[in-house]
Amino acid sequence: MKKITQAELNVMEVLWENSPQPASDIARSLATQKQWNIKTVKTLLSRLVDKNALSTTKDGRRFLYAPLISRDIYARKAARTLSDRLFGGRATPLVAHLAEGRGLSDEDIADLEKLLSDLKREGLKNER
């Protein structure tokens, strides 16, 4: 999939929350955050369709839009791309950079510890 811009990501977020939706509903959802008109939203939708990030279905005279990629899969690919570009594909410097930049809450640390524990356990299962 081609790179999704921040503006396009705003549209994707609306559709990940609820889809399929027509352009008018997406524009209404974004109106509280952005000063975009319906033409801008339709342009972003068209770009996302061209990038194979959205599908369209005809519903009477309007089109309904739905994501072709899940939020989790997109986040995984984006994180991998960032890690590759900035840290040579290594996760540790990425996490360290995030921790230094804004700190980690106790909840973040507990989540990371659980994740590491789960990954170790999975690694042991795979070795058997």
Image (cartoon, grey):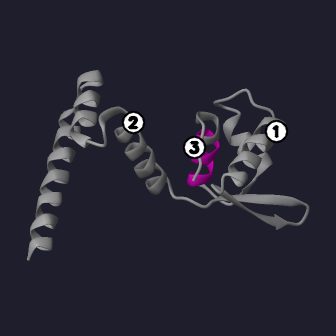
In which quadrant of the rendered view does residue 69 lie? bottom right
Amino acid residing under circle 2: Arg
Decide if residue 69 is on the left or right side of residue 47.
left
Amino acid residing under circle 1: Ile
In which quadrant of the rendered view does residue 100 lie? top left
Decide if residue 44 is on the left or right side of residue 60.
left
Camera-nearest label, 2 or 3:
2
Q: Position of residue 116 (x, y in %)?
A: 15, 52
Q: Position of residue 47 (x, y in %)?
A: 72, 46
Q: Which residues are magenta?
A: 9-17
Asked whether residue 3 is drawn in magenta, I would say no
* Nearer to us in this view, 78 or 89: 89
Circle 3 sits on which residue?
3
Q: Position of residue 35 (x, y in %)?
A: 73, 26
Look at the numbered discs 2 and 3 and tell me whether their residues touch, using CB distance below 8 Å.
no
Camera-nearest label, 3 or 1:
3
Asked whether residue 15 is drawn in magenta, I would say yes
* Nearer to us in this view, 52 or 85: 85
* Nearer to us in this view, 94 or 33: 94
Please rate how many residues cluster around mark 3, counting C-alpha atoms within 10 Å: few if below 14, some from 14 to 19, many from 20: few
Which of the numbered marks, if any, corresponds to residue 85?
A: 2
Between the residue at mark 2 and the residue at mark 3, the CA separation in whole angstroms equals 14 Å
x 81%, y 59%: residue: 63
Which of the numbered marks, if any, corresponds to residue 120?
A: none
Q: Earlier in the sequence, mark 1 or mark 2?
A: 1
Between the residue at mark 3 and the residue at mark 1, the CA separation in whole angstroms equals 23 Å
Circle 1 sits on which residue?
38
Give above or below for 112 relative to 64: above
